[in-house]
Image: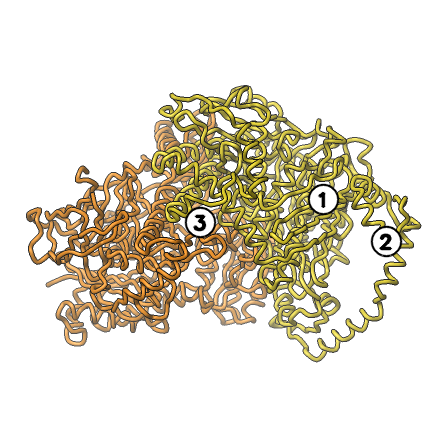
Chain colours: A yellow, B orange
Amino acid sequence: VSTAHAAKVEPRPGLRGRVAENDRLLRETGCLFGLETLARKHEDPGTYEAVWHILLNICNTGWTVGCKVSSSPVAAEGGDALWSLHLPTGEAVCTSKGIVSHPGLLSLLLRRYIEQGYEENPGFRPGDIFENNDPHYGGIHSPDFQTTIPIFYEGELVAWAGSVSHVMDAGFITPGSIGFLNPDCFSDGVPVTMERVGEGDRFYPWYEMRMKSRTRTPDWVLGDARGRLAGCLTIRDRVIKLVDKYGLAFVRDVMREYIEDSRRYAVARVRTQAIPGRVRKSNFKDLAMAGKRVILPEQNIDCLFNLPLEVSIDGDAKVRFSLRGASGWVPFGENITPAACISALLNGYSHVVGFDMFNWGSVAAWTLDTPPAGSWANPYPVNYFASSGVAWAPAVMWLSSLYETFGRLYYARGFIEEVAAGAATTMTAEFSGVNQYGIYSAGLTLEQASNGSPARGMADGENSAWSIYTPQADFGNAEITELFYPIVYIGRNVEPDSGGYGTFRGGLGHTAVWLVRNTPGIEYQCGCAGIRSKIVANHGMFGAYPTWPDRPSYAIDTDVAELIAAQKPLVHERGDPERPDLVKNVHARILEPNAIAPFVTPELLHENDLVIHPISGAQAIGDPIERDPQMVKADLDNAWTREWVARNVHGVVATQDPTSKEWTVDETATARRRDEVRTERKRRGVPFREWWQAERQKILAGEQMAEAVRTMWRTSMRLSPDYAEELRAFWKLPEDFAF
Amino acid sequence: MARYLVACDAGGTMTDVIVVDEAGRSVIGKAPTTPHDESIGYMESLEEALRYMQMDLAKDGAAFCGAIETAIYTGTSMLNALINLSGLRTGLLVTRGFEDVIVQGRGSQTFIDCQWSEITHMQYRKHRRPLVPRKLTRGVTERVDMFGRTVIPLYEHEVERGVRELLADGIESLAILFLHSFRNPAHEQRAAAMARAIMQETGRTVPVVISSEVAPTMREVSRANATVIQAYASEPARKQLLRVEERLAEKGYRHSLKTVLCYGGITNIRYPRLFETVMSGPVGGIMGAHYLARTIGLDHVVCSDVGGTSFDAGAITAGMLPINREPPFQQMYVNVPMLDIRSIGAGTGTYIRLDPQTSRIKLGPDSAGGTPGPVFQEQGNEIPTVNDCNILLGVLNEHYYLGGRVKVNKQKSYDVFKAKIADPLGLDVYVAAEQCVELVNVLMREHLVRSLMVGHDLRDYVLLGYGGGGPLHLLGYAGDYPWKAVCTVPHAGAFSAWGGACMDYAHRRHKSVSAILPHGADTATRMHAAAIVTATWEELEKELLAELESEGFRRDQISLRQIVYIRYYGQLEDVEVESPVPRLASDADVDALVAAFEDVFTKMFTLAGKPSDPTYQVTEVSVIAQVDTVKPTLAKHPLEGTTPRTQASKGTRQVFQLGRWHEAKIWEMGELRPGNEIDGIAVIEAPNTTLFVPPDWHVRIDEYDIYWLTRGGTR
């Protein structure tokens, strides 16, 4: 504690009033804090810039300290953590690197403390530690712990330091931190509900006791807590020194100006690169759980989410987002709150706009209509018990649409290099059970932290290089992951053809193949942090073909020991989808080559059992038969695509030299093959009107419509009557039509 | 007869040769680098250096070269091979299922050196072109687990097939990487033996490199990169080095040529793990600082080097060199111990722009470097740079830039800076220029105090500035932080080359281990862990002694230092600790090691990071074997009076500082003498550098010719 400053502490009253005043000023002036001019910036642009760099370095120092103290690979290796600096009223000023989905949540959480009267009771004092992970009160899902500490200077609350990290086990009803199976909030694990969890820079003993008794991996959970706190303390001490040097008035002013400056930047970028109008991207996600291991009987269903993203831009470059048409809440851990949707959008905005002054400002550059009450994006008004075990699951897929919507706007304006297709999905792998050290452990691998990146307007996506939830996408080293779980990798290669097909293909994903070793038994949970079970979602842009759904595999009670003894082929990748290597090479009592994700293995895995876990690639741009044949050849040379894909999808005819393994494109045959593809497309094609009429008949007849489909449309229309009206109008359905 | 030390730093553009005599006097020669045959540029540079000594290479070469005690060469051939993809056609045998370990790498390699705004904006990321294409990679079924136990025995028929196919495909070297081979190298060793046997049978032999010999440390992606770099680039680089040695030998040089290791130290160019020299360019500065610090008795030094394009910094703590065991390099992470030199794109040539959307001042990170250089050089650059500001402010002498060899058009700097920066900001040109210089100083300062010095107390450290722009910005980035002292040297512009001559002969080996000291463990458990560490030290020492003895050193010339990397069990980050004891032979030895660790950890990560009831884990062990070498003498001079000689004064010049013009005294550095003292505001000029002394600062030159800078004359 900086006791010199603590001595004169007197909580400054009126934060609630200042929050209201800030709202009024924004409403009336269109500028945050009513800052119609950035006086400090104009008077002293050099110092303005210098202090920004100092704050940025302060937050990143918090990151360095916090991650090194943290014990979980998810935070330190996977980048699923963040440290930030906030105004007294909550708005994020500056953030460290890391998971940029969270500054928005921290901002809203701090605001909520103020609105709930915490300034008076329990009060904000130097050395206090506040924490939350409760989605009902500003959290996203319980594994993401949000720690904040007040920063006082000469008795005045001048800022907050904040941090979020994702813990390995949140005490869910099932082990781990990806609680898609949670039926309700009572299964969502250990709650910390907007609490003061420590004072004098120390956690209360009862906080640590609660983590020890209510999480399965308390050492990791508490290690992360210490990391969050150490980073926040580092930020606090350095901010105090900064104020010493530059003066409170200057620092206070520029912190607000940075936020307003960021808002202006976001507006300017949209004004420069996009066009006014309205665009809606339809997107859907399924969650196929019927017939699988679930917690409660009512979960024995398949669900379909409607994830519409509507973007309206007016002539002043004001952006408005809407979730009109979002379908209803689900009895799984895949519901999210409006606050978390805002934070998710803030994250997405950093991807599609790109900030070097990233903070709360961009949130003021747009608005999000309150999502339909009772939808997956706003469940509590209707079902206060809804679970948010892995609230990111629908949100990341919804967010993926942001890339495409902005991509279209940028394309329309000629900013082709800024176009990006949809992001990949995030299928997680968690293991729980007794590990190779004889200790119970549960946790997440880092596989999902590195998907293929989306195709760009002028280039392919990159393989295993992007994750929609953290820009620090990285799956780390297999040798490190093996320290944590009783598995050995026997494969971690690029998965051929796992990105969408197009003129520019999506970056490819990879496939991890694990052999279970050194355990009396572990459970594998193929989790949904945003995946497709059966359906294709987010199809790619401008005529591209989409990626395939995620299809993990496993084999229990295998003959791997015999295969090894006989030096026969094992399984190192998925292989030909028509006849996967698992089927070709391995015999097992239970062998599932094409499991529908997500799921939990039906029984514990033991020695020599196998898991094959694919990580998807991203979406593509443009017609695949317009892809440069030499780019197809390069993919063939790298074994990133297959000959029949080249021929059938890209219309590229190529042959391989058996000795050098080099592929050669037959230009003449390729031209001929592409003509054939075009001819075939014309043969199959029907005029839009005919297609529309046929589909309309199906809708009216309720034909080929699973219950999940009907439920989705029914709830979408019920929760968003104006959306229902548009839907009926488009399909010319009767006014009283309902699914 | 005189004896000489000749050190060379061949950069991408210029090759610098420094010749040091026994008295510590030095001369520097420069010549364009000749990548196709680096010996040409080397000899031309040496020739120029000799001219400063009134010698002629053709006439006096034999006598001179015969008197060279040590010749050290740092070249770029390995780096060029990696950049231009001009190394050997390398094949890779890898654990089956990991054939993409090079082409796929890992995501974090795609944004090495990117700024945060670029990292969040996905369009920027890009994998580098792989050194080994996928089609020259073959998988071999095998697996060893983290404990070193065989899970899947080596499928030898796959080794045989893979090697034969790769040889048929014309590979010129073969790299082998199997998972956890650092724990149990049997599979790699067997595969290598099989490969050599097949080569013998087929009559086609290529170098075979295995990861467990090259870099026996954890993290397969970084180990694969290290192994492949060794296989791909080391032999072509060695050819260049041998060629330089040959040219020197032709002139009479009688010893082996030495080269510089990334972790600081010199070695024979026949050193087997030549990839450890892959990035030795910035090493010279730190090693020079290390030598200087040892000579004058400093323990803690922050080394800062301001060049035209970057600001490089590293910290020597308690005499220990900073080491990064997995540094980013050429868009790869590499398991090679490298001096931990952290750089940002901020230098004297850094571009200054305004953001078109927000009018924010943006510095770099790109720069005009030496070519085309600042606007005033009129070499085609129309974007203002930091040195344009330094010229405008009068800090740099427009008539003495690089000793007057470069003509300066100050008016052009003024016009361009005014139009592009000052006017749009609505500021006076000189106010804006001063703000830009202060901003670059802040970036450098922040880089030092936050990125580099996390957990260290600045009051313990001396800040040393060097590099062509170091003395110019030193007091700007020293700022008002409480450094123990701030200093620079007169030959700051050539300090890195000088440092290259100051290195010991040193080899270093690392090996990953796992030794756990549980909380409250009994003596038997503790000594079991201690035995793992001690045995690994012994193993590494044996290897290092064999290497150095094979190079002709006697055992009594070699000193050994034992290092461990230790962490609280469960945490991911370990901390480097030099063991206070050479062996862990007792409970007390273990306690001493743990105490040393806890001292370092608490300083770095605050008490909040320390768990209650801690268990400790040693993750890696290292040994440094060192042989003292002949080095330039840091001459001690008699102190003269505090007042400089008359001929040192160059009059006065108007310098803009703190918002107004000052009359600054100008001094010629070459004419100043130990004992002289100068008050700011002053400018001390030399052909290759300029020391700026702001108002309220004071300079004192000590007996080693080191310039100590204090504020208000109080320090």
User: Which residue is labeled 2 in the image?
Assistant: A731
Q: Nearer the viewer, residue A233 or A427?
A: A233
Label 2 or label 3, whichever lies nearer to me, is 2
Question: With B288 as the anchor, is A243 left or right in this view?
Answer: right
In the image, B552 versus A682, the foreground residue is A682
Q: Measure the C-alpha gap from mark 1 to mark 3.
A: 45 Å
Quadrant where the N terminus of chain B sits is: bottom left
Image quadrant occupied by the C terminus of chain B: top left
Kind of residue at badge 3: Glu
Q: From the viewer's perspective, is residue A149 above or below residue B511?
A: above
* Whether residue A524 is situated above or below residue B116 in the rendered picture: above
Residue under the image location 43 percent in, 64 percent down:
B233
| Secondary structure at numbered mark 2 | helix
Kindly indicate the quadrant of the structure image that contains residue B300: top left
Q: Which residue is mark 3?
A: B326
Query: Residue A323 bears which disc, if any?
Result: 1
Q: Residue at the spot x=40%, y=28% of the render?
A: A153
Whether discs 1 and 3 lie on one chain: the answer is: no
Residue A720 location (% of width, % of height): 78, 42
Please state the chain letter of the residue tagged with numbered disc 2 in the rendered image: A
Q: Nearer the viewer, residue B197 or A12?
A: A12
Q: Residue A44: x, y in percent?
A: 37, 46
Most distant residue in the right direction: A701
Question: Callout 3: residue from which chain?
Answer: B
Given the image, what chain letter belongs to the residue carrying mark 1?
A
Label 2, label 1: how many angstroms apart (C-alpha)? 20 Å
Mark 3: secondary structure: loop
